[in-house]
Amino acid sequence: MADRTETEKRNLAEALAAAVRGEVSFTAADRALMTMDASNYRRVPMAVVAPRDAEDVAAALRVCREHAVPVVPRGGGTSIAGQATGVGVVLDFTRHLNRIVSLDPAARTAVVQPGVILDDLRAAAGAHQLTFGPDPSTHSRCTLGGMIGNNSCGSHSVAWGTTADSVRELELLTYGGEQVRAGRGTDPTGAPTGLPPRLRDGVKALVDAELALLRTGYPALPRRISGYALDALLPEAGTDLARALTGSEGTLGVLTEATVRLVETPAARALAVLGYPDESAAAEAAHTLLPHRPMTVEGMAADLVGSAAGLPKGGAWLFVEMGGASPGEAAARAEALCRAAAADGTTDHALVTDPAGQRALWRIREDASGTATRLSDGSEAWPGWEDCAVPPARLGPYLRDFRALLTQHGLRGTPYGHFGDGCIHIRIDFDLLTAPGIRRFREFSYDLGELVVAHGGSLSGEHGDGQARAELLPKMYGPELVAVFERFKSLWDPAAGLNPGMLVRPARLDENLRFAPLPKGPVPVEFGYPHDNGDFSAAVRRCVGVAKCRNTTTGPGSADVMCPSFRATGEEQHSTRGRARLLHEMLAGEVITDGWQSPEVREALDLCLSCKGCRSDCPVGVDMATYKAEFLHHHYEGRLRPAAHYSMGRLPQWLHAAAPLAPALNALARTPLAALGKRLGGIAPERPIPALATETFTHWWWHRRRTTGAPYPASGRTVVLWPDTFTNHLSPQVGRSAVRVLEAAGLRPLLPPTAPLRAGSAPLPRRHRPLCCGLTYVSTGQLDQARAVMRRTVEVLGPLLQDGRPLVVLEPSCAATLRTDLPELLPGDPRAAQLAHSVRTFAQALEELAPDWRPPRLDRPVAGQTHCHQHAVLGDSADRRLRERAGLTGSLTGGCCGLAGNFGFERGHYEVSVSCAEDQLLPAVRESAPEAEILADGFSCRTQLDQLGDRPGRHLAEVLAEALGEGESAGAGGPEGEPGVRRG
């Protein structure tokens, strides 16, 4: 719609604003958020409308019709074929039209609006031991409207079929404004029920004229999703108009309400994981398991899952889920299947009955749509041939031919998917950035289309045709049936106003590629982006739109963090995907035209907590915390920064200067003058100022070194204990406790000096600028200062760590910064990599260096939260094992505390900060037993609990030190001449 004049756009905006009660946006940010779905394609809309109800939808259609503007209905935006992108007005159903209107357990039906998230329907139905059968891997964020538009399926389709099998009635509006109530059956004229006169007569005439073609033109297979399902209108098929419209990709009508079928869920499930020598063997075996009535038959090969724990011996696996009325029955059915499969050549098998173990294995499968976008060598891989399907008995031969075709074109990919239904998912390493690569993409697509048809298959087995495959529909159906599709489209949408370019009269499959407007060369940046060869564009391209960041909950038993700001606001721009889309458009320069100075990107990143959750939880490893720091660096380069960047971004400097005045400043913080200080510093007025330590940890350490003479154990290993800013100035008790525990475990903790060591130098001066990891500078995008303090840290610690000494870091956010940000900001310094490699958490150091030490037994439950940076970067397995050895039972929650360093202290962030805390942390603490130990290793987490909760949290080191009691330390002295040790 780029050829529209500004006057025409203004007139459209005024007309929509006057007619629609929901939100109408023509802003660059909102348009940028809708340019892409989870496909290879990109189209820029004119506007985004979030209708409040069906009347709003009708009003929007009327205005768009009067202005000859096309309309694209959109749900969660997880479509893989491009059908959720468009150049006109995008109707966003996720904001308002997202209710479960009714649920009838007796009839096993539900009435839903198009924006309902699948998992929300499944949760509501689950209260009655029911569920919605189709369950694509995006079930936590995809919408029912999108599933109906694409005829989605999922892993349980061998048991419960496709979405078309679960649809009973659809209420739609055509582009012309006609109301349709599509169901099953005919009216007295023999036409499908629920149609207005024009459509009733036209549809009946078309079907009557093409009976022979409709009866012979469709392949018979369970996953035939491509094209219009006009064979559902045959009399012998029950004249099922609802089924015929399911999978029409928003090209015929706009869905406003649907009545869907629910199915009974088994009381218990058991998961059989069958190992096979290779992918072909697994594919050949899959259809032979169907007589056992499995609920799933999912296939994966070693090139996708790697060395995932819990998988039996083999080069490929089938995940086969069996249901039963009891755990024993489910397990017995699974065991019988394993015995039958073993007779046909499995290499090994595993039977998983534990729900947590099943969830862990299913997560491997569900994340595949993202993890498959990066091959084992880091190469990018893309959709486009994501889900073609063949008859299940043909899957083995088809996969062999498919692999051969990949080799012929010099391409690679990792097939996986719904082997029991003959449906294969794959991401292929297409080069979609250069003209030769795009030609190869097109040539391969044509060749593969012919291969699929030769095996009796469907171009799409789940995600629809969209732009990715619609051009090839004549190969599958022949020109005569495709011409019938076009006539059907013209009947419903004579103005071609609904999702033009999809299914019929499609755009070419190599047009509108999302990468075309991106810079052709690397963008100058500060971080090294080692996983993307230093290319910021490639880093941003990581986001393929699968939208796991749009999960509204983290799920039972999950430790996931991503994405706390989206869960707090529900806004797309505050999801990891939304921010990545805005960065993509910033680099493209078409919608967002200000580059690094973009206010749209700045606003979206403002509520990013830099929790790093996406670094681990995003299936493709999008690292928004790093991208935010990069953006802030360029955005404010040479410009005045927000006050909070000076007050909290340079916190280590202020705390060092304030240390001698701690008592006076603490008293001042309790006076009315504190409000003025917070206002000047850009600090939220709701936030109390944390008290400064009257004795810093380092002061205590060096005083103790001067006054004690107790030697270390001769056999103890030396560790360098990092005196981070937060421990040193705000929580010195954590450092003191850590020293006690490390010494009790037979280790020799030493603090680093605070200036570079020089051979033959005099004793180092006492008063000197402290070392710093650079965390606060990174989180506020002050990367020049961050690099400066990091260089100094590397210079000081380099000599101490050359012999392999570990660097024990008590504050998880500082440990994560030293582990990842430091080497990525100093990519050319080998000492930075050495330092990063030396970092150990408190629990990791004890487990690795004192494996025989037995911690004191506490025998009490725990509650609290694993620090988000520890979850994302460092892992908490050592912590869990240490807690278990100490008799601290139970699990910590996932998520983010919401304070997140400077974030929760910054003015304007308080409400989101509190909402994040209320997501998991505060409820978990409130619901914990009175005797539970509240654990929070991060200073931010403890501060959030202090300020918002009624039970304080402690670092694990504090808990263990208290249990050790007095006199159990191994001493604090050390031999003279220890290299790198500052003397008193």
Image (cartoon, rainbow, N blue to C red):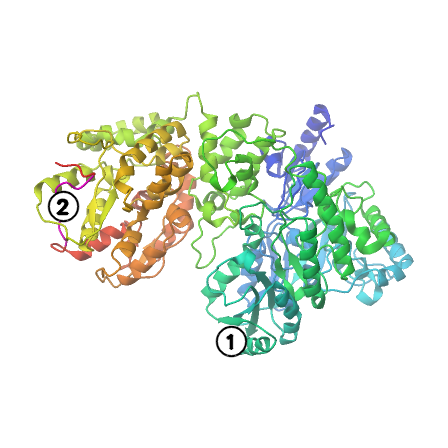
| Near-viewer residue (342 or 512) | 342
For the point 81% across and 48% down, the residue is 489
Which mark's residue is nearer the viewer, 1 or 2?
Answer: 2
Check disc 1: other Cα within 10 Å, few if <14, some if 14-19, many if 20+.
many
State the count of labels.
2
Q: Do residues under tags 1 and 2 come within 8 Å of each other at their CB atoms?
A: no
Q: x, y (%) of residue 605?
A: 48, 35
On residue 331, the disc is 1
Q: x, y (%) of residue 197?
A: 85, 51
Q: Is residue 915 above or below residue 200?
A: above
Amino acid bearing label 1: Ala
Q: Earlier in the sequence, mark 1 or mark 2?
A: 1
Residue 613 appears left or right of 657: right
Residue 87 appears left or right of 585: right
Residue 350 appears left or right of 143: left
Q: SS at mark 1? A: helix
On residue 974, the disc is 2
The span from disc 1 to disc 2 (Cα, nearest Å) is 59 Å
For the point 20% across and 55% down, the residue is 745
Q: Is residue 420 above or below residue 625?
A: below
Amino acid bearing label 2: Gly
For the record, the magenta segment spans: 969-979
Q: Is residue 533 magenta?
A: no
On residue 892, the disc is none
Q: Main secondary structure of the magenta part?
A: loop
Asked where in the image residue 1 lies, by quadrant, the reply is top right
Q: x, y (%) of residue 661?
A: 19, 29
For the point 54% across and 30% down, the residue is 523
Asked where in the image residue 827 lies, by quadrant, the reply is top left
